[in-house]
Structure formats: structure tokens, C-alpha cells
Image: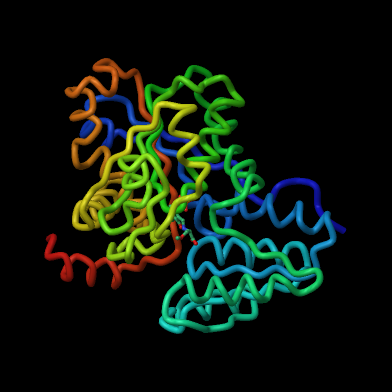
């Protein structure tokens, strides 16, 4: 039987003394890094998979080698449905082991995600098979919107801004859907990307979708070469401030967050935290793009599984940021 309640858990929203000191205003952290399956992804992916199971789906397939793939494998296991994860041949053994540990069948094909995705779409033409998009489907956005309902429950009054990271734009689209639902559509969103995965920023500047030639950022989880078309509509419905940080700022933010809050997150999440640690919020206030007197800001700590103390050391050496 398909369970009615969602797979995700309500996560803590905690004021961070350390980040509030850095920002010069109250910073509330939404800890999606302690979410089931290690990131916020389970909100959208779990909801999508449950709905597909209700519609008779018998086999899930997903081309995400990252957190969406882990969330899809977890969801399939909860639903008792087989799942195939299609990944580029370069995928780390750690990720393959983790996915197989969640009961998924893993197929390695192609050099990059796009080639694996072609294979996943081919498989999804089989009868009863459904392809799970990491970020580009209304059910994914609907599931991600649950995060804002929790913010409303915890905060009651709207925050001065919400800070989040953008890869393909599924989190952004979900947060916009949630803000509209709870009547907080006037709350500005600071959309963070790393250079080399800045497909949303490029699309906003061009006024249309832009496909990056390659993903050159170390924040692999932000590595969608083209954002969901829905994100451009979001930028019209809400006030979305797009900012891009360098990889070394994202990795430095990961290190500072580890020291400040004793939690280890991916560089993708470091991109969001860099809005505080790299003084971007203060600059936006100086530029008049954010109100000079924000009573609070919420940063979504999106989490991510693909990080370890060894990987952090290697990233710091590679980017020579001590
Ligand atoms: C390419 O990758 C898309 C997706 N990661 C997306 C992701 C994001 C960005 O979320 P999005 O904007 O794609 O909804 C932020 N923070 C973390 C930890 C993530 O894993 C994936 O796992 O396949």
C-alpha cells in the first residue's frame, strides 16, 4: 500500500549566534542537512515518487548521481518499487555503493550526466517506468514548498529574506510556490550559485534559458547546465536576487560553517552560506537591493551527502584556500 504521509521530516529552524554576528542581523538556519536522505531533495522527490506510485508506476529511474538520486532510491525503497539510477562512468565508488546500499540498481553509462540522462529517458519509455527529474517537475516544486510551510509555522512573521542555492532551480521554484501559498510573496529570495555552475544567473542576464558549455565548479550538486524554465517565471513572480560566488568562497564557507556550527555540508550548500560569510547580504543592503534594516534572514542549509573531511581537505588544497 502507498503510505499517505510524506517521507520528509520537519527540520529544525535555529537562530545561529555565529552567523548572526557575521551578518550583523539575526540569521535563522533551516537545517535540511539533517533531512532524511541527507538533503532537502526528499521533499520534492518523495512527493513525486508517491504520486507516481499512486498512478501505477512500477519502476523508477533517475539520472542523478547526487542527492536527488539518493532521495529517489530512498523513496523507491519506502514504496517497495524497484529503482534504476543511471550515472556517468566517472561516478565515485562511494556514491555507487551508497545507492546500491539503498537497494537501487546502478547503471554506469556515458562520460557526463547529459549522456546518462539520455539513457534514463530511454529506459523510462518502458511500460510502467517513470523518470524522476532532479529538479524540473511541478510535483517536485510542490513537495519542496513544504519547507516554507514549516518556516511559517516557526516564524509566524515573514523573514527579511530567504537565501538558497540554485542548481536546476527545483528548490527555488518550490520556495516561490511556498511563499505564494503562505502569503509571503513579497519576501526577497537571494539565489546563490557558484561560478562554473551559474546557469540561472546567465539565464537572468540573457532574459532566456542559457546552456552552459560545461560545469567547471567543484559544487557538482549545482551542476545543471540549464535551469528549469519555471525559474525564469519565478523571477517575475517574486523578488529574486541572483548572486554568484567563486568556488573558493563556497569551500571557505563550508569550513567556517564546520567551525561555527560543527556541521559538514557540500560546497553546493557553502554557496548559500557564502551569502553571509562573503558579506553579500551587507553589499545588497548597501546597494539598496535589500532593505537596510532586515529584522531577520533565513538561510536554507541544503546539506548534501557528497562531502567528507578528506574531500574538504582536498578541495581546500586544490583551491588553495587555507
Ligand atoms: C545537478 O544536480 C541536481 C541535484 N542537486 C541539487 C542540489 C541543490 C540545488 O537544487 P536545485 O536547484 O537543483 O533544485 C542544492 N544543494 C544540494 C545539496 C543539491 O544536491 C542532484 O542531486 O541531482
Residue 45, quarter of the rendered image: bottom right
Is residue 10 at all visible to an observer of this figure? yes
Residue depicted at 43% across the width and 55% down the height: 226
- Whether residue 15 is visible here, answered yes or no, is no
Q: Position of residue 114 (x, y in %)?
A: 47, 70
Which residue corresponds to the image point at 61% horizontal and 50% vertical from the top-left?
A: 137
Q: Position of residue 37 (x, y in %)?
A: 56, 60
Q: Position of residue 127 (x, y in %)?
A: 81, 72
Please report the residue visible at 36 percent of the width from the left and 28 percent of the height from the top.
297
In front here: 197 or 43?
197
Q: What is the basis of the colouring in this image?
A: rainbow
Furthest-right residue in this view? 1
- 79 relative to 83, above or below: above
Q: Position of residue 203 (x, y in %)?
A: 37, 45
Quarter of the image where one finds residue 145: top right
Task: Report whether 66 appears left or right of 203.
Answer: right
**In this rendering, position of residue 232 left or right of residue 195:** right
Q: Quadrant of residue 24?
A: top left
- The quadrant of the rendering that contains the C terminus is bottom left
Height in image: 297 above or below 71?
Answer: above
Of 206 and 287, nearer the camera is 206
Which quadrant: the N terminus? bottom right
Q: Decide if residue 175 is on the left or right side of residue 189.
A: right
Q: What is the number of callouts on the image?
A: 0
Amino acid at each position: 500500500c502507498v503510505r499517505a504521509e510524506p517521507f520528509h521530516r520537519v527540520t529544525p529552524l535555529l537562530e545561529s549566534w555565529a552567523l548572526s554576528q557575521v551578518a550583523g542581523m539575526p540569521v535563522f538556519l533551516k537545517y535540511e542537512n539533517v533531512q532524511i536522505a541527507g538533503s532537502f531533495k526528499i521533499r520534492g522527490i518523495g512527493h513525486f515518487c508517491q504520486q507516481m506510485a499512486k498512478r501505477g508506476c512500477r519502476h523508477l529511474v533517475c539520472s542523478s548521481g547526487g542527492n536527488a538520486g539518493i532521495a529517489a532510491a530512498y523513496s523507491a525503497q519506502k514504496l517497495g518499487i524497484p529503482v534504476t539510477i543511471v550515472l556517468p562512468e566517472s561516478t565515485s565508488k562511494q556514491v555507487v555503493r551508497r545507492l546500491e546500499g539503498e537497494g537501487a540498481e546502478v547503471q554506469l553509462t556515458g562520460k557526463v550526466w547529459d549522456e546518462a540522462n539520455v539513457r534514463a529517458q530511454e529506459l523510462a519509455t518502458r511500460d510502467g517506468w517513470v523518470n524522476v527529474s532532479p529538479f524540473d517537475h511541478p510535483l517536485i516544486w510542490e513537495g519542496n514548498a513544504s519547507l516554507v510551510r514549516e518556516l511559517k509555522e516557526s516564524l509566524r512573521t515573514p523573514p527579511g529574506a530567504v537565501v538558497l542555492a540554485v542548481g536546476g532551480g527545483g528548490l527555488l521554484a518550490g520556495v516561490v510556490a511556498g511563499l505564494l501559498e503562505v502569503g509571503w510573496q513579497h519576501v526577497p529570495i537571494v539565489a546563490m550559485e557558484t561560478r562554473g555552475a551559474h546557469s540561472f544567473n546567465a539565464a537572468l542576464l540573457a532574459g532566456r534559458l542559457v546552456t552552459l558549455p560545461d560545469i567547471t565548479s567543484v559544487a557538482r550538486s549545482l551542476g545543471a547546465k540549464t535551469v528549469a524554465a519555471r525559474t525564469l517565471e519565478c523571477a517575475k513572480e517574486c523578488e529574486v536576487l541572483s548572486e554568484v560566488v567563486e568556488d573558493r568562497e563556497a569551500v571557505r564557507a563550508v569550513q567556517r560553517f564546520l567551525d561555527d556550527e560543527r556541521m559538514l555540508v557540500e560546497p553546493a550548500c557553502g554557496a548559500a552560506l557564502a551569502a553571509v560569510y562573503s558579506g553579500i547580504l551587507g553589499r545588497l543592503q548597501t546597494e539598496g537591493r535589500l532593505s537596510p534594516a532586515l529584522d531577520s534572514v533565513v538561510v536554507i542549509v541544503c546539506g548534501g551527502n557528497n562531502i567528507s573531511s578528506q574531500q574538504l581537505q582536498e578541495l581546500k588544497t586544490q583551491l588553495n584556500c587555507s
